[in-house]
Image (cartoon, helix red, strand yellow):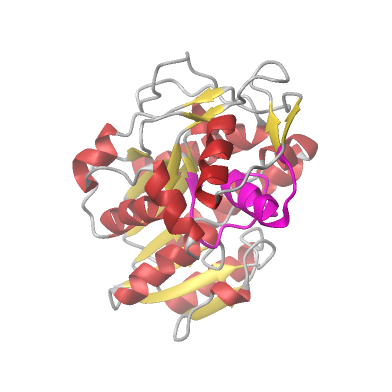
Amino acid sequence: MRVLVTGGAGFIGSHLVEALVGKKVEVAVLDNLQSGSRNNLFDGVAFFECDICDRDAVFQAVREFQPDVVTHHAAQSSVVESVRDCSADAQTNVLGTINLLEAAVAANVSRFLFASTGGAIYGDIPSGSRAGIELTPQPISPYGIGKLAAETYVRYFQQWVGLPVNILRYANVYGPRQSSHAEAGVVAIFLAKIRKGEPLTIYARKHPGDEGCIRDYVHVSDVVQANIGAIEGRISAPVLNVATGLGTSTYQLARHLTQLFGKETELVFADKREGDVEYSVLDGDGFQQLFGTAVTLREGLRNTLLF
């Protein structure tokens, strides 16, 4: 089997590439290295350095490698950046996805996997509830809107073009190799600040001084499991939440990390950020029925600290 991983030099993509290489799968990476790193590339893995917005380069890479499966992780992943520049966000996350879909069809790819977002697509949900795939998406940020639009194109290619697809809606993913420079990587950001002795910022859920937004934190190893399952054809549902089903506030996350480090760190309580979903917990039952209990937050944070 031949698998093309877009964004394969990034955080999630590189973990997936590593797992596929371990399974003796022939892998290629397509990445523009804007947020990914050459340090995340593996020996023996073909590499196409190009942007998914470059239609000709995308078609050439897919035509040259001739993958059986494309798993699409390349994206603009910052909610804050999407608010600052809606057009750039849409160009990458919508038009870039269309380029890959059309290239996949032209190359007779047998399956297309789309890495989507759970929290940003569902939007704010009632406290104490969990967002299931049957819930009507209500994104509140340009990032979530773009991902939903891309999902809709993916479903169009499934229904009208006949391309087999899987859409994986991730909760807040964390783990080793996550960049502390990316707005979405709060675990990595907090770890870097704790190591430097810098304060941790708790952005308000509603008002400065509260515990911050509630998130469902899923370890990258569970995300890799879901991708491998989809690549191997073990996920029949076209859409799957990849999540723990448990909510953790930003304050609770900060406390978990400071306790694991064994040191006190100053906490700074800031205003709510535009585009931030206040409460985001996904229904992860479908994932856990297929792959078993998700990695707990404490176990996952310990694993992350070891790297």
Q: Is residue 174 magenta?
A: yes
Report whether residue 114 is seen.
no
Q: Is residue 87 above or below residue 65?
A: above
Image position, residue 48 (x, y; %): 57, 76
Residue at image point 52% right, 44% down: 259
* Above or below, comparing residue 263 to residue 58 in the picture: above
In depth, the one of 181 and 36 nearer the eye is 181
For the view shown, which residue lies furthest in the bottom direction?
44
Q: Position of residue 111 (x, y in %)?
A: 33, 57
13 or 166: nearer the eye?
Answer: 13
Position of residue 46 in the picture relative to residue 228 (left or right): right
Q: Which residue is depicted at the point 35% across and 55% down?
A: 227
Query: Which region of the structure is painted magenta?
Result: 173-200
Residue at image position (49%, 18%) is: 125
Residue 264, image x, y percentages: 64, 42
- Residue furthest out toward the top: 126
Q: Nearer the viewer, residue 122 or 104?
A: 122
| Left-right relation of 178 to 167 | right
Can residue 70 be seen here? The reply is: yes
Residue at far right of view: 84
Q: Is residue 21 magenta?
A: no
Q: Quadrant of the N terminus?
A: bottom left
Taking the image as shown, residue 118 lies to the left or right of residue 166, namely right
- In this rendering, the answer to whether 135 lies above or below 182 is above
Say which quarter of the image contains residue 255: top right
The quarter of the displayed image where residue 58 is located = bottom right
Q: Is residue 2 left or right of residue 220?
A: left
Residue 213 % position (x, y): 59, 26
